[in-house]
Image (tube, rainbow, N blue to C red):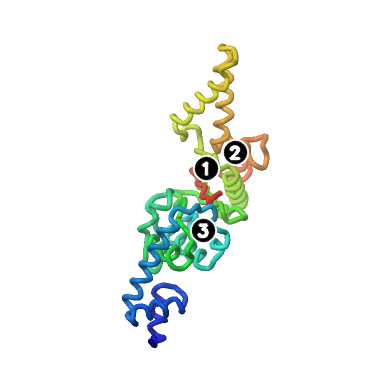
Amino acid sequence: MTIDAKLVAELRARTGLPMMKCKQALMEADGDLEKAGDNLRKEGSKTIDKLKDRDMKDGLVFVHREGPVAAAVAVLCETDFVARSEDFVAFGKALAKALHAKAPADAGEGDALNGVALADGRTVKEHLDELVGSKIRENMKVGEFARFKPKEGTVAVYVHHNNRIACLVELAGSGLKDNDAVAELGNDLGMQIAFHSQLQGLTEKDLDAKWVEKERQIFLAQSENMPEDKRDKIAAGKLAKRLKEVVLLDQPFIKNEKVSVQQHVAEVAKQAGVKVSIARFARVGAGA
């Protein structure tokens, strides 16, 4: 059976699949474009089902910044080869741009983005189904995301050299735009956050009380062989050290561990002659 080249080209435009795959589908559908498209979708659905339980330990982060708003999102896959592919990167960039324009929340997990429409009008889920089922044929999903639109001040963006970690840091204050000292501060804070995946909050007040109590009980149990009058003191000391590991402002500053992050921010503000504080932060990682 002879298949019109225009039909093959149209099916390829709809599906993004190779020409030979589209021609084969049309031949099996006796030249019926709609039937061929439906058959390819069914085939893709079977592929998605086969791949859905595979681990996704690789991926990249994508960032879009325009004006005062910055957005970052992680896209996960199985292998580095796919993460560097043209289709994967194009999807990640389009997703970051759509997230920058509008997001269902300031931060969250990928499932919340399934209904978000990209520039072509199709949703994130529709794009993922096409990529996994027809183009890439490797398990994929959208991971963490964040979008910051500051009320005042600025948002610093840090992307780690491996493109698998992106950090957003909202700095509150006035006179921060085009300030070199503030820009360096933002970059340094992003680096600090990137290197500490265990961070849970900006201050101790941000920590979950149940988590803090669980940690306290663990340290008490670790000290059970100590004299009873020393147990509470030892456990309290270990808890204080643990909290410094998970609270950003209390951590030793990455470039000078003799001062805390909070002390460094205050020193930069003093030297730059501006008022600046950390309003919030987000760490977005693609398997990192």
- Whole-percent x and y of residue 117? 37, 62
Residue 62 is tagged as 3
Q: Is residue 54 above or below residue 269?
A: below
Q: Which mark is residue 261?
A: 2
Q: Earlier in the sequence, mark 2 or mark 3?
A: 3
Q: Say which of marks 1 and 3 sits in front.
A: 3
Q: Secondary structure at mark 1?
A: strand
Task: Name the residue carrying label 1.
Answer: 278
- Could you tell whether 139 is left or right of 160 in the image? left
Q: Residue at x 58, y 37 (%)?
A: 262
Query: Could you classify mark 2 by the number of other residues whose Cα lies within 10 Å: few (under 14), some (14-19), or many (20 or more)?
Result: many
State left or right for residue 213 relative to residue 231: left
Q: Say which label, 2 or 1, has the lower sequence index.
A: 2
Between the C-alphas of marks 1 and 3, the distance is 23 Å
Give 75 or 38, whichever is nearer the viewer. 38
Q: Nearer the viewer, mark 2 or mark 3?
A: 3
Question: Is the C-beta separation of discs 2 and 1 under 8 Å?
Answer: yes
Q: Which amino acid type corresponds to the residue marked 1 in the rendered image?
A: Ile
* Mark 2 and mark 3: Cα distance apart in space: 27 Å
Q: Earlier in the sequence, mark 1 or mark 3?
A: 3
Front in this rendered view, residue 78 or 100: 78
Instruction: Inspect the image, locate mark 3, and give the three-letter code of the amino acid beneath it.
Output: Phe
